[in-house]
């Protein structure tokens, strides 16, 4: 069970996306690993990857996280920042809709 507000939001969005058949990979940042990358990679239908950086409500990414987000975006990846459950569900809905409509 998640101990932090960020973890609770993250777990809820992973579960929500899983209800649509979306698989996820939690990014692990242990000793010796590069930090600053988004928390979760969502493997959307049709081979579309979506990275989401989860934050506690009202918080924003650190400078290091913003640099990593920029690297991913420059390479053409979709990256979002989420600090609440409603916005997270909307992100999943929006991306799934865009994929289904061919607008992504």
Image (cartoon, rainbow, N blue to C red):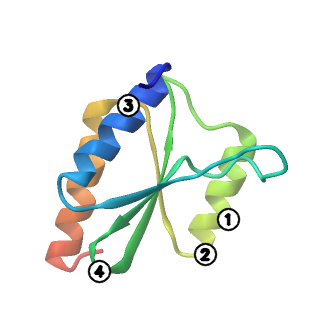
Residue for point 23% across, 45% down: 16
Q: Is residue 18 left or right of residue 39?
A: left
Image spot of residue 35 (x, y percent): 74, 47
- Among the two numbered marks 3 and 4 on one chain, the one whose residue lies closer to the N terminus: 3
* Gap in angstroms between the C-alphas marked 1 and 2: 6 Å
Which residue in the protein does label 4 denote?
46
- Residues tagged 1 and 2 counted as in contact (Cβ below 8 A): yes
Q: Which residue is mark 3?
A: 9
Residue plotted at (54% across, 26% down) = 59
The local secondary structure at tag 3 comes to helix
The reply to whether residue 28 is in sight is yes
Q: Residues within 10 Å of mark 1 (few under 14, many from 20)?
A: few
Q: Secondary structure at mark 4?
A: helix
> In this figure, which residue is indicated by the disc labeled 2?
75
Tag on residue 43? none
Q: Nearer the viewer, mark 4 or mark 1?
A: 4
């Amino acid at each position: 069970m998640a101990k932090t507000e960020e973890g609770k939001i993250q777990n809820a969005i992973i579960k929500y996306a899983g209800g649509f058949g979306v698989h996820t990979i939690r990014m692990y940042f242990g000793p010796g690993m590069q930090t600053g990358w988004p928390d979760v990679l969502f493997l959307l239908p049709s081979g579309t990857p979506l990275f989401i950086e989860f934050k506690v409500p009202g918080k924003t990414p650190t400078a290091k996280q913003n640099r990593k987000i920029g690297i991913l975006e420059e390479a053409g990846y979709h990256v979002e920042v989420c600090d609440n459950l409603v916005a997270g569900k909307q992100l999943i809905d929006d991306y799934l809709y865009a994929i289904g409509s061919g607008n992504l």
